[in-house]
Amino acid sequence: MQSKSTPSSGAAFIQRFIKHPAQVGTIAATSPAVSRRLAEPIPETGEPLVVELGPGTGAVTEWIRRRLNGRGHHLAIEIDPVFAEMLRTNYPDLDIAVADAGNLSTLLADRGLGKVDVVVSALPWTLLSDEQTRRILSALAASMTPDGVFTTITYTTARMLPPWRRVLAALNDTFESVEPSAAIWRNIPPAYVYEARRPRTQKPA
Ligand SMILES: C[S@@+](CC[C@H](N)C(=O)[O-])C[C@H]1O[C@@H](n2cnc3c(N)ncnc32)[C@H](O)[C@@H]1O
């Protein structure tokens, strides 16, 4: 499969960052090395339901599609209508919702979709409030299968700082297991992929 990344997708990413820095969160799209790692928990067989949060210009979308190879269902939830329009052009068969990730339950119900097997996210978690973070994570936990997997990214530059520690605490409250990858240097900035498993249906005591 050919990558749909074009020179104009890089320019669009920077333009949207300048317009909505707190929503886009970074000036460069995720690298193939990190995108591939984010998509890795998608099972190689069966018909998995995969939800992608914040697809932007489609860097991670591409790797989810490679992994699915026409199987299952891929729902991409993007809050920015300009990014959503680019995705529609590049991936006419992709199920795209222009919406806030926190509305996941409604989006699934509207489509008659069941529980989600894998959620892949490149949302700018450290720029969200704790309330927003926990609202989105609760929506995910409520919508995932018991053995569902959630993957997300943080940067080496952010990992030791208070905003990520706050996100990590919320992740640990939402999932029984939260594990980081080794640092992946081929990304701007270098990144870690976090993999979270076994969504909690009730808050830990
Ligand atoms: C860091 S960019 C990642 C883009 C792309 N997935 C990548 O990895 O290159 C974050 C993306 O999340 C989107 N976003 C931010 N907040 C969102 C929310 N609450 N719901 C859905 N999308 C959101 C932004 O518009 C942007 O496309």
Image (cartoon, rainbow, N blue to C red):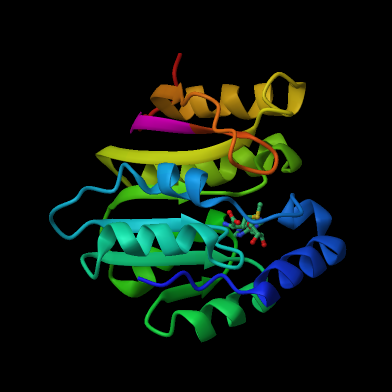
Residue 128 versus residue 205 in the image, above or below: below
Q: Position of residue 7 (x, y in %)?
A: 67, 73
Residue under the image location 22 percent in, 64 percent down: 72
Task: Give yes or no for residue 196 being in the magenta stretch.
Answer: yes
Viewer can see residue 87: yes
State ligand 1's quadrant. Answer: bottom right
For residue 43, side relative to residue 8 (left or right): left
**Image quadrant in which you'd find residue 67:** bottom left
Using the image as rendered, state which of residue 113 and residue 24 is in the foreground.
Answer: 24
Magenta span contains residue 43: no
Identity of the residue furthest to the right in this view? 18
Which residue is at 67% across, 46% downward? 124
Task: Give the left or right position of residue 170, taking residue 48 as reference.
Answer: right
Segment tinted magenta in the rendering: 194-199
Is the magenta region chiefly helix, strand or loop?
Answer: strand
Q: Residue furthest left?
A: 46
Count of picture labels: 0
Residue 73: x, y in percent? 28, 66
Instruction: Please determine whether, in this image, residue 138 is positioned above or below residue 44.
Output: above
The picture quadrant where one finds residue 179 is top left
Quarter occupied by the C terminus: top left
Q: Residue at x 42, y 32 (%)?
A: 195
Instruction: Find the residue positioned furthest to the top.
Output: 205
Q: Quadrant of the N terminus?
A: bottom left
Q: Position of residue 98 (x, y in %)?
A: 57, 73
Q: Residue at x 79, y 52 (%)?
A: 22
Q: Is residue 143 visible?
A: no
Residue 69: quarter of image: bottom left
Q: Decide: is 125 above or below 5.
A: above
Q: Is residue 82 above or below residue 45?
A: below
